[in-house]
Image (spheres, rainbow, N blue to C red):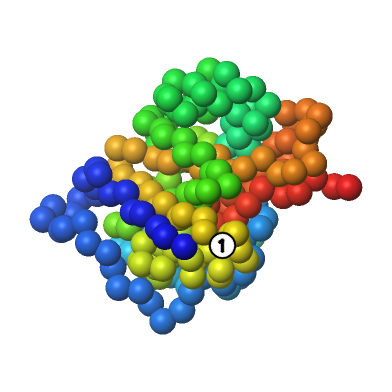
Amino acid sequence: MSHDHDHDHDHDHGAPGRAPGRPEAGPHRPGGSGDDLGDRGAHHHSELGEMDLRVRALETVLTQKGYIDPAALAVLIDTYQTQIGPRNGARVVARAWADPAFADWLQRDASAAIAPLGYTGRQGEHMVAVFNTSAQHHLVVCTLCSCYPWPVLGLPPTWYKSAPYRARAVKDPLGVLADFGVQLPEGTAIRVWDSTAELRYLVIPQRPAGSAGLSEAALADLVTRDSMIGTGLAKAPAP
């Protein structure tokens, strides 16, 4: 299989002078099948940045003083990370599957097409939708940090921000897909898109066979978060 890597835009994350190079891969790969909206435990290998460390320290202090309940906070984060946010993107995908005119609009100007659905705001101002086909599969990464389309996908999963994923998605996309349990037909081209502070990508997975006649709501239930990043496929409808 062949793969391309798009990195046409500069990152702007407070790291002046740093070339848009690719970090070295870690000794491990993100594990798990990645076929659900939830995180997999084996995906949590990550190197915390300075901001993450500060947040962890603040959380520890607030917990020790009794101001927050870690369990309640974990539930809140999981809800936004795995349910509320990704459901927005799933509705966009379902609309594209069901409405050819909308799909065409989404492909030409994703930001404008998504705006009427109400999924706009910070981290989603400039969107590009890339459509998977039988000949080409798209995979999204942010090689320098964790740029992510919050309005349509919610909070980025831990593995998406990890150094191993950011490095290996570029160097070994086929291996990364295998780690997530994704096996593509022989000859499928893989195109890797590098998100930036200016541009965020949404993968439109292929519509699964057997989904003809389903409502948009039912179609949205087939769309997983990982399928909109490219590390998963849409689910097959129940028989």
Drawn side of residue 169 relative to residue 15, left or right: right
Residue indicated by mark 1 = 186
Quarter of the image for residue 180 reads bottom right
Q: Is residue 22 above or below residue 124?
A: below
Drawn side of residue 21 relative to residue 175, left or right: left
Whole-percent x, y for residue 203 in the image: 51, 43
Drawn side of residue 159 relative to residue 39, left or right: left
Q: Is residue 188 above or below residue 164?
A: above
Question: In terms of depth relative to the viewer, which is nearer, 214 or 74?
Answer: 214
Residue at 30% of width from left, 42% of height from top? 197
Badge 1: how crowded within 10 Å, few (<14), some, or many (20+)? few
In the picture as drawn, the residue positioned furthest to the bottom comes out as: 27
Quarter of the image for residue 172 reads bottom left
Q: Is residue 39 above or below residue 114?
A: below
Tag 1's secondary structure?
Answer: loop
Drawn side of residue 50 relative to residue 220, left or right: left
Question: In terms of depth relative to the viewer, which is nearer, 57 or 61?
Answer: 57
Count of numbered circles in the view: 1
Whole-percent x, y for residue 75 in the image: 64, 54
Residue at 62% of width from left, 43% of height from top? 206
Going by the numbered disc 1, the residue's amino acid type is Glu
Residue 198 visible (yes or no): yes
Question: In terms of depth relative to the viewer, which is nearer, 212 or 92?
Answer: 212
Whole-percent x, y for residue 217 in the image: 75, 31
Quarter of the image for residue 212 reads top right
Residue at 41% of width from left, 81% of height from top? 27
Residue at 15% of width from left, 58% of height from top? 18
Question: In terms of depth relative to the viewer, which is nearer, 147 or 5?
Answer: 5
Whole-percent x, y for residue 123 in the image: 40, 37
In the picture as drawn, the residue positioned furthest to the right comes out as: 239
